[in-house]
Each structure stands twice: as C-alpha cells, then as structure tokens.
Amino acid sequence: MTLGAQVQQDAVVHVLGVRFHTLTRQQVVEQLLHWIDEKTRRMVITAGPEFVMQTQKDEELRHIAHVADLVTPDGIGVVWAANRKKKVVQERVTGVELVQELLNTAEQRHQPLRVFLLGASESSLKACLRRFRKDYPLCEFAGRNGYFRERDLPEIMGQIESFAPHVWLVGLGQPKQEKLIYHWLGSLPPCVAIGVGGSIDVWGGTVKRAPAAFRKLNLEWLYRLLKQPSRWRRQLALPRFVWHVLRKAGHDT
Ligand code: UDP
C-alpha cells in the first residue's frame, strides 16, 4: 500500500499518533475513482475516536493505520481533536456517506463499478444488495455475509477474486475488518478496499442512522447509545479519547 500521488503528504493531521487525511468527502471520492482507474490495490480506513483508542494498545493496528492509503475522520471527536490548533478538517467523512457519494458519482459519470460487500447478517446484506441494485443500476454488486469461520476465508477470497471488484467493502466492525483487509488485499486482483463498520445495516435499513437533528448537533454518538444501550462500554472510548487528547495538548502526536 503506497500513498497515492494525489494524496499530498501535507494534507494530513495526526491525532494520538494516527495520521488522518484532511480531504473533503468529494475529494476522497475523486481519489478513489482515480485509484480505480489506475488499477492499484488501496486500503481506506474510516476512523473515529474508538478506532484511535484501539490503536493505542494494538501495535498491529497502529501499523495498519500507518500503511493505509487513506484514513478519513469518521467521528466528531476526531474532527474536534484535529482542529484544536488550526482548522484543517472541514467535515466528517463517514463510511456510510462516502460509499453512497462514490456510487452516485460513478452513476452520474456512467462509470459502471463492480462492488463486493463482505459483512453483516444475511438479511441486512440481502436488503442492502437489493437497495444498491435498484439505486445504482449501472453498477454490479455481489456479497457475502460476515458470519463465517476462519477456515472459510480462502474460499471467500476465491469468490471475491472471481468477481474481480473495483471496490471491496468490508463491514465486520473495527478492528476485525482492517486486519482482514490488511492480510488479504494482496491476494486479490487490484481493488480499493474500504472498512465500513455497520454501514451495511444502515444501507439495508435494519439499523437507522441518527435523525438529521442529532447529526447537526454532532450528537450521533448519543443517538446510537440511546438506541443500543449495550454500546455503553464501547462508547467509554469517547471520554477516554478526549482525556488523552487534552493530556497530550501541545504535542502533535
Ligand atoms: N459483523 C459481522 N461479522 C462479525 C461481527 C460483526 O459481519 O463477526 C458485522 C455486524 O453485523 C455489523 C458490523 O459488523 O453489521 C459491525 O457494526 P458496528 O456497528 O459494531 O460497527 P461500527 O460501525 O461501530 O464499526
């Protein structure tokens, strides 16, 4: 995974050691389409505070974040931390919106993309594939649910290889999806791999995204907590993240 010429080295900001690219969503879309044209293997991470906190105690994940071609700020906490000294990040670039914008742009430009989705339950995946096939008729979609055994992976990779996608979306949750992409991308034909977390559930309609009012107030995390109280333990990463950022104030690490 090598950093593309278009992603300039100075268009980055570090948050607790993780290097984020400061591109807008549309700029990221252009970059992805360029990589697709180039036919190279690329890895994209959409990272929020929870991911950043995972990298603090997981050396392999830190390495993966370091070699990824693009790391986007997915989470208001990351935008806040990145912009504390100087406003460098203009907007959140979430997996849900990034992929929709990529597919919209490809359709508008009559660029038929082949997209493989790996992740989520069978029912979410089916609903998502139905919706994508209807909304993006020029593109071609295939998928496999995310509940498989380790030993099934070679067979799954064979399925992806024969589909030869331009875009490989992996929605297994973090950090599982990033580790899987890191270990398997090299064995697939060139494609752009994006870790999309629970986005397949959102596209399929089995999980609702926070209403616009919550998103506008940057309270999407609160909505998710109210809808799925079982997430509280995971969401403790948020205050821990804020505390770490404040503690490291003054250092660009
Ligand atoms: N998932 C999966 N296989 C697994 C574990 C999880 O496909 O072994 C899926 C799960 O169904 C959900 C997604 O991974 O669609 C994780 O969603 P979550 O909201 O936890 O991810 P986030 O967006 O917070 O990273």
Image (cartoon, rainbow, N blue to C red):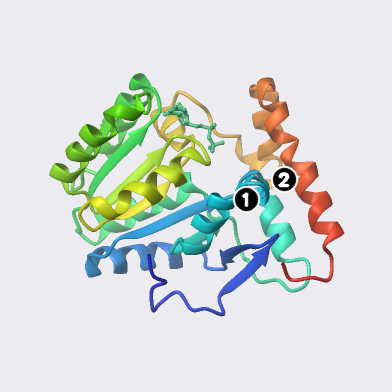
Identify which residue, 156 or 226, lies in the foreground.
156
Which one is closest to the eye, mark 2 or mark 1? 1
Q: In the image, is 24 to the left or to the right of 213?
A: left
- Could you say which is closer to the camera, residue 148 or residue 26? 148
Q: Position of residue 61 (x, y in %)?
A: 54, 50
The quadrant the C terminus occupies is bottom right
Q: Is the C-beta separation of discs 2 and 1 under 8 Å?
A: no
Which quadrant is home to the N terminus?
bottom left
Question: Considering only vertical position in the picture, is 245 above or below 126?
Answer: below
Pick whichever, 128 or 3, lies toward us.
3
Residue 100 appearing in the image: no
Under circle 2, the secondary element is: loop
Q: Is residue 148 visible?
A: yes
Q: Residue at x 72, y 27 (%)?
A: 232
Measure how far apart labels 2 and 1 are at the Cα level. Answer: 27 Å
Q: Label 1, on which residue? A: 55
Q: Residue at x 13, y 43 (%)?
A: 162
The answer to which quarter of the image holds residue 117 is top left
Q: Amino acid at mark 2?
A: Leu
The relative height of residue 252 versus residue 60 in the rendered view (above or below) is below
User: Which label is found at residue 217?
Assistant: 2
Residue farthest left in this picture: 162
In the image, 187: left or right of 179? left
* x and y, in percent, of residue 6 in the image: 40, 77
**Could you tell me which residue is drawn at 52 percent across and 49 percent down?**
94
From the top left corner, tell me how far across and down residue 113 is, in percent.
22, 52
